[in-house]
Amino acid sequence: MLLHARFVERPLILLSNDDGHFSRGIQAMRAALSKIGDVVIAAPETEQSAASHALSLHKPLRLRRVEEGVFAIDGTPADSVYVALHADNRVLPRRPDLVVSGLNHGMNLGQDVFYSGTVAAAREGALRGLPAIAASVNLKADFAAAAEVCAGLALKILARPIQDAVLVNVNIPREWPNGIRATKLGSRHYEEVLDFRKDPRGREYLWIGGPGVRHEPDLGSDTDAYDQGAISLTSLVLDLTSSAHSTLLKELST
Ligand code: MN
């Protein structure tokens, strides 16, 4: 595929995630994206899964250069992208052409997008007006092959003549005999659990969240695509305004 004429040099891709800069998923993605552009990683120092879009406004952060083109930030996924985009040229030589987040270790389907640090890192790029891809993969999938699919999607997004803040959530099942399809968000139901325990000093502590998750069949959804062995592409909005309950809002307005 030919890139648009604006690319006099290789595209610059900012790569982040929520599993940490060292994770298997981000390394697979770095290898695949490096074939289509210059890749700079700015990602959390430690795992930040389910950190959503938190920003560390109340603690100092450290930006650590791990190696050429790899930076670790001891904050959240959104911090990482924020820092990379605003650090003048400490991290990036110029404004990137694309932000990619992933490969996340595990799926981000349905309402997961509200909790996902992977999606948030991509969304932080989209909020700055950049095209962005969040990509998540089944732990038993071939990570290299999954990353190659994402690089192909990235190339197509970079090739568009107009670069707007498209935000695409990609989910890659263990195998994808049924290809790649456009989807809407499905609905995932997690086991809602509080597990109260006692520490060695007799004080109570607790874990939130159960291990179980299920979803119902839902035509056209990312969860259906997952069940059917297809890669799902869901476009996410940045404007969360709903037209539902407009009558109620009118009644509440004075
Ligand atoms: Mn994660």
Image (spheres, helix red, strand yellow):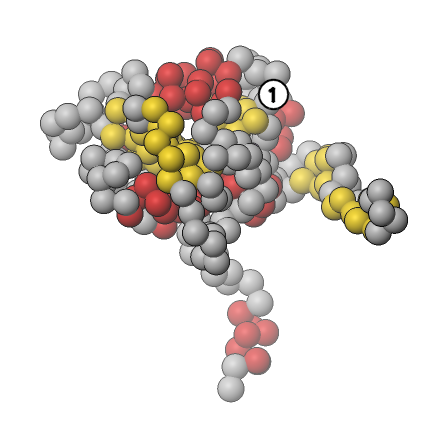
Q: Position of residue 105 (x, y in %)?
A: 56, 27
Q: Which residue is drawn at 36% across and 50% down?
A: 127
Q: Which residue is drawn at 37% across and 40% down?
A: 63
Q: Against 10, is 161 above or below? A: below
**Residue type beneath disc 1:** Leu
- Residue furthest to the front in view is 201
Between 40 and 59, the residue placed more toward the observer is 59
Q: Against 40, is 115 above or below? A: below
Q: Which residue is drawn at 26% across and 24% down?
A: 38
Between 37 and 41, the residue placed more toward the observer is 41
Q: Position of residue 41 (x, y in %)?
A: 36, 30
Query: Image quarter for residue 9?
Result: top left
**Label 1 sits on residue:** 139
Answer with left or right where residue 105 lies relative to residue 61: right
Quadrant of the frame with the N terminus: top left
Q: Where is residue 227 in the image (x, y as percent from the top left)?
A: 65, 25
